[in-house]
Amino acid sequence: MNNFLTYILQDWQVNAETSSKSRFILLMFRLAQIIKSLPAPFSLLFIPYRFFYILIIDWILGIDLHWDTQIGANLQLHHSHALVINHDTIIGANCTIRHSTTIGNKKLPDGSYSSSPKIGNNVDIGANVVIIGSIIIGDNAVIGAGSVVVKNVSESTVVAGNPARIIRSNNSTKLPVFDTIIMDNL
């Protein structure tokens, strides 16, 4: 029972300063994951819970967060409004996502769809961000508000804009050209 409570409340503390709505959404999300993983016949409980989850989270609160999305511990949701996170997305631990963000796949020229992004640990995603396609966002990356990310983002890198461009990189193995020029002129 203690493991059950620990699991469903894993995002509770990091959302203490965000909103009770964020806490409620993540509690419902983690509970859905547990119920779905129960062995038969207990997994039959998931059918009515699934409808309840969709009604509350998707229809009433306007959050498209599929219950089988892989999300690490301590997800922080700021303002938790107008979020769309594709069910194939993988999000690491200790990430922050702000309102009006879309994370998902994209339609390819041949009419098929790409896979969804894989987001590392400790990633901070600003408001009104779009991250689409079969891309990887490295650990400790920061995605600035209003960015459209369609290419990989290296770890410890700050990107912003449409399309997203490197603003700063703390990754010692790969400095952007702009930082290299500044360092050469010193």
Image (cartoon, grey):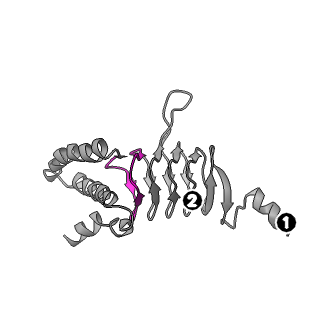
Q: Mark 2 to mark 1: distance in Å?
A: 25 Å
Name the residue that disc number 2 marks: 142
Residue 48 horizontal/vertical position (percent): 16, 45
Residue 171 part of the magenta segment:
no
**Residue labelled with disc 1:** 184
Q: Earlier in the sequence, mark 2 or mark 1?
A: 2
* Residue 74: percent from left, percent from top: 39, 65
Marks 2 and 1 in Cβ contact (< 8 Å): no
Q: Amino acid at mark 1?
A: Asp
In the displayed orientation, state which residue is furthest to the bottom: 2
Q: Position of residue 163 (x, y in %)?
A: 63, 44
User: Which stretch did the figure color magenta?
Assistant: 64-87
Secondary structure of the residue carrying tag 2 is: strand
The residue shown at (54%, 62%) is 139
Q: Residue at x 58, y 54 (%)?
A: 144
| Amino acid bearing label 2 | Val
